[in-house]
Image (cartoon, rainbow, N blue to C red):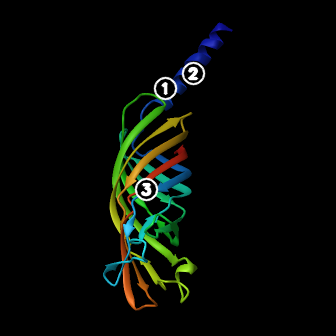
Amino acid sequence: MKKNLLAVAVLSSLSLSAFAGGFQAGDMVVRGGLVNVQPDSSEFTIYAGGEPVDLGLGNLLASVEDDTQVSLNFVYFYDSNWAVEVLAATPFSHDITVNLGDGTKTNLGKTKHLPPTVSALYYFDTNSNFKPYVGAGVNYTFFFDEKFNSAMEGPDSPLELSDLKLKNSWGLSAQIGADYYFDDNWSINASVRYIDIHTKARFKALDGAADGHVNVDIDPMVYSLQVGYKF
């Protein structure tokens, strides 16, 4: 009986050390979960005809709201420390809010975007189930399905806005994160990353009589919580 217990203890120890050790070249991890994008809280001046738009209460200021979507990413290891990660997600939908100049805010419109990001990751040697890492990469954000709130369009609107279009963006990203492995394959992952996203929104105002624009530094903090499986 004692020999059987000893054998079980030895096997358990070997199993623990197997997934508490480092990664190997060729390891691949697939993760899925939730990701929240929180844009910079700054507000940005809206221009039309080359001048700030003012409805008598102060300059109109635009800002972008946050959104949460389903995330999917892939990690491929080149050795026990270095890996490359590809981040993907279902399309984010952001409300665009306008400050009317006196602190009153209303919905200006909305846009969708996808921010695929490729990063190099460095995993620290911990010899434990807890695997912290840092990363840096490149992001390409493309915007689509941009539209104004219907209350901002047409003759009943003081601005008569139309033809909203946001410019796609290239930028850098940086992140910190960690995996916790429950066994050889399954893990939970949490990460925080910053992405440099700058876009210029163009539109028509006054029923097409004036060109308008607003420069927006979205620069979001991105928070994710995911479950991973290592192949």
Task: Report how far apart the C-alphas of labels 3 and 1 lie in the structure.
Answer: 28 Å
How many numbered markers are drawn? Answer: 3
Quadrant in which residue 139 is drawn: bottom left
Most extreme residue toward the top is 2
Instruction: Determine the secondary structure under disc 3.
Output: strand
Label 2 sits on what residue type?
Leu
**Spot occupied by residue 46 in the image (x, y as percentages of width and height):** 38, 74
Residue highlighted by disc 1? 17
Q: Which of label 1 and label 2 is nearer to you?
A: 1
Instruction: Determine the secondary structure under disc 1.
Output: helix
Quadrant in which the N terminus is drawn = top right
Residue highlighted by disc 3? 86
Quadrant in which residue 170 is drawn: bottom left
Left/right of residue 29 with respect to residue 140 in the rendered view:
right
Task: Report how far apart the C-alphas of labels 1 and 2 lie in the structure.
Answer: 10 Å
State the residue in front, 222 or 42.
42
Label 1 sits on what residue type?
Ser
Label 3 sits on what residue type?
Val
State the residue in front, 203 or 81.
203
Q: Earlier in the sequence, mark 1 or mark 2?
A: 2
Q: Which of label 3 and label 1 is nearer to you?
A: 3
* Residue depicted at 44% across the width and 35% down the height: 131
Q: Residues within 10 Å of mark 1 (few under 14, many from 20)?
A: some
Residue highlighted by disc 2? 11
**Spot occupied by residue 164 in the image (x, y as percentages of width and height):** 45, 80
* Residue depicted at 47% across the width and 55% down the height: 38
